[in-house]
Image (tube, grey):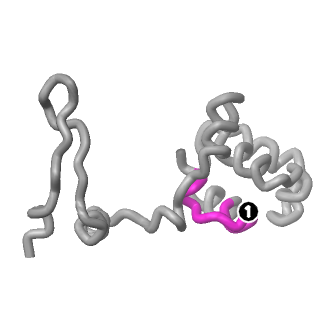
Amino acid sequence: MNALTNVQYINGSNGMPEFAVMPIATLEWLKQKAGFNNPLETGIPDSVAAITLDNNYSAVRAWREHLGLTQAEVAQRLGISQSAYSQQESAQTLRKKSREKIAAALGLHPDQLDF
């Protein structure tokens, strides 16, 4: 099956393709081939992205604020002190294991904390 036969291109003002329109089945086939996760499982709401960008916050802090939680509440869920959690929240990068634990505490997929 050649799943790319129904793709239509929309050209920009320079005459070059800028957008592609395709059937959902083709999109799903491409996502499966690329190994993409379900966007409903790993998506980032606009409000979380805005909190991150507008305030220069980490993804972890933006999600926590979006969910209306305090650092103490998340720390309690993780079984660590608030100050230890604060350090993780302000880190530029998290170790994979830390990201997985925090994601579980927030009810998220770990990929949602990696942006």
- Residue 34 placement (x, y as % from top left): 27, 62
Q: Answer with the quarter of the image where residue 103 lies.
A: bottom right
Q: Secondary structure at mark 1?
A: helix
Of residues 29 and 70, the one nearer the viewer is 29
Disc 1 packing (10 Å; few <14; some 14–19; many ≥20): some
Q: Is residue 108 left or right of residue 25?
A: right
Residue to which mark 1 is pinned: 106
- Residue 47 placement (x, y as % from top left): 66, 44
Q: Answer with the quarter of the image where residue 79 lies.
A: bottom right
Q: Residue at x 27, y 71 (%)?
A: 25
Magenta stretch in the rendered image: 103-113
**Quarter of the image where the N terminus is located:** bottom left
Q: Residue at x 25, y 65 (%)?
A: 23
Of residues 37 and 99, the one nearer the viewer is 37
- Residue 81 placement (x, y as % from top left): 89, 54
Q: Amino acid at mark 1?
A: Leu
- Identify whether 55 is placed above or below 72: above
Of residues 112 and 24, the one nearer the viewer is 24
Q: Is residue 101 magenta?
A: no
Looking at the image, the residue that sits furthest to the bottom is 1
Q: Is residue 44 left or right of residue 71?
A: left
- Residue 112 placement (x, y as % from top left): 57, 56
- Identify whether 79 is placed above or below 52: below
Q: Is residue 92 left or right of residue 15?
A: right
Q: Residue at x 65, y 57 (%)?
A: 98
Q: Main secondary structure of the magenta part?
A: helix
- Identify whether 86 is placed above or below 26: above
